[in-house]
Image (tube, helix red, strand yellow):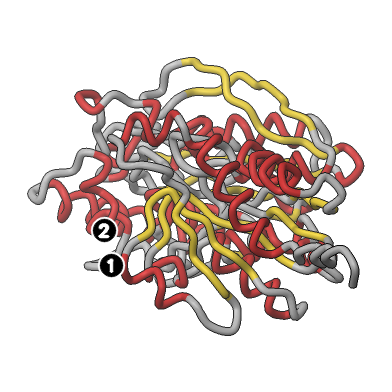
């Protein structure tokens, strides 16, 4: 029997690598001869780099950068030397989780650190970049990132504007003379499951600004700042990007990458699926185990377990979803692609304990399910027959 273990991370409990390993331990508890193929997965957010490196034989690289508040920091990106591929998560340099709640300020937050990491990846020889756009603290339409890559954002008197969305309010022109020329010969793939445009009621400021510290009174001003960015930057690059699906991802970083590079905007889980060759790994398997921290009806809207299940379905292999929290509506997912949804909790407990015991819970759940999948040995005939 062959079982593919292809989970996402279970947030605050285990990484996708750890989750895949826990599944395999549970399976081997029941039958050590079962072939387990471990394919850690992600959907473009936290854990994307780790999942890709685990499968593509890459390495972590540390680099100097700036955090979302503009302070000197150290970030990491993934690098796969054989493919000259770099994997960058926006959250590594401009992550919301890195900024204390009391310090969050979407007017001042800058994406400069993302540009720092891109430049370091190019210096290392990367010719292909995958950029995961989840978890940013910024709302500057990628102005900080582009500034780190050589774009000069200027006011009416030709002076550099301040960092962050606040500086965009006085933006009058941009100077592209020092833009890093390597961007033109680099393939950019953007991993995101966000389809919001840059501006308006469904734009970056209105939908995601409140998560980053914006009050209802801030939102119109932030949207005006991004409108100013679009009015000045789009003509400079001769590209209109404000209405592109995904332009509003990561506070407008989607728009910045789209305007300055030939980046393609892709579903995060589909990008990771293709990069790790998931369908080839599933081919010939008997079962696929996947899952993440929470499973509900929205899982079918581009989340990792659903993407994995669809890949399994294409290969004619049934998938089982495991979740730390399984909502009542999660069972609506059961159909051609998903044959079961399994909660991993073993007993009633509080959230901190559930997160702490996640690895063991997942291992035990995988073992329980495997016992039901392994054919029973033929019964021993009674004596004399």
* Residue 247 sits above or below residue 22 on the image: below
Question: Which residue is painted at 70% across and 40% down in the image?
Answer: 25
* Residue 288 sits above or below residue 75 on the image: below
> Badge 2: how crowded within 10 Å, few (<14), some, or many (20+)?
some
Label 2: which residue? 207
Q: Quadrant of the C terminus?
A: bottom right
Instruction: Find numbered disc 1 in the image and state the secondary structure of the residue it sits on.
Output: loop
* Residue 115 sits above or below residue 230 on the image: above
* Percent coordinates x, y for residue 351 in the rendering: 31, 36
Instruction: Find numbered disc 2 in the image and state the secondary structure of the residue it sits on.
Output: helix
Question: Which residue is painted at 76% across and 66% down in the image?
Answer: 375
- Left or right of residue 105: residue 372: right
- Left or right of residue 158: residue 321: right
Q: Residue furthest left?
A: 217
In the drawing, what numbered circle is on residue 202? 1
* Percent coordinates x, y for residue 167 in the rendering: 30, 37
Q: Are marks 1 and 2 in contact (CB under 8 Å)?
A: yes
Quick one: 134 or 251, which is closer to the camera?
134
Quick one: 37 or 181, which is closer to the camera?
37
* Residue 33 sits above or below residue 103 on the image: below
């Amino acid at each position: 029997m062959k079982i593919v273990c292809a989970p996402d991370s279970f947030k605050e409990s285990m990484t996708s690598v750890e989750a895949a390993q826990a599944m395999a331990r549970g399976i081997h508890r029941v039958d050590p001869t079962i072939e387990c193929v471990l394919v850690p997965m992600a959907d473009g957010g936290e854990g994307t780099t780790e999942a890709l490196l685990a499968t593509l034989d890459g390495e972590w690289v540390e680099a100097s950068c700036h955090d979302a508040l503009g302070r000197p920091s150290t970030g990491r990106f993934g690098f796969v030397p054989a493919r000259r591929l770099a994997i960058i998560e926006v959250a590594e340099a401009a992550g919301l989780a890195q900024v204390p709640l009391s310090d969050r300020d979407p007017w001042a937050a800058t994406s400069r650190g993302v540009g720092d990491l891109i430049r370091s990846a190019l210096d290392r020889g990367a010719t292909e970049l995958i950029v995961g756009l989840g978890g940013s603290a910024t709302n500057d339409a990628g102005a900080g990132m582009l500034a780190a890559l050589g774009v000069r954002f200027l006011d009416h008197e030709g002076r550099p504007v301040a960092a962050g969305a606040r500086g965009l309010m006085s933006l009058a022109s941009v100077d592209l003379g020092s833009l890093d020329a390597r961007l033109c010969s680099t393939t950019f793939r953007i991993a995101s499951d966000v389809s919001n445009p840059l501006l308006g009621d469904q734009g970056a400021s209105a939908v995601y600004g409140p998560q980053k510290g914006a009050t209802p009174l801030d939102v119109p001003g932030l949207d005006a700042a991004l409108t100013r960015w679009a009015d000045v930057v789009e003509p400079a690059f001769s590209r209109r990007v404000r209405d592109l699906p995904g332009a509003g991802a990561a506070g407008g970083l989607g728009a910045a990458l789209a305007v300055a590079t030939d980046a393609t905007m892709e579903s995060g889980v589909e990008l990771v699926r293709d990069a790790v060759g998931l369908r080839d790994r599933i081919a010939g398997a008997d079962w696929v185990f996947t899952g993440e921290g929470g499973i509900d009806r929205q899982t079918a809207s581009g989340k990792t377990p659903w993407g994995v299940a669809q890949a399994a379905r294409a290969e004619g292999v049934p998938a089982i979803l495991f979740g730390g929290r399984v909502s009542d509506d999660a069972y609506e997912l059961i159909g051609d692609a998903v044959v079961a949804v399994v909660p991993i909790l073993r007993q009633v407990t509080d959230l901190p304990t559930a997160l702490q015991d996640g690895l063991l819970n997942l291992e035990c759940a995988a073992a329980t399910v495997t016992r039901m999948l392994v054919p029973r040995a033929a019964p021993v005939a009674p004596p004399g027959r």
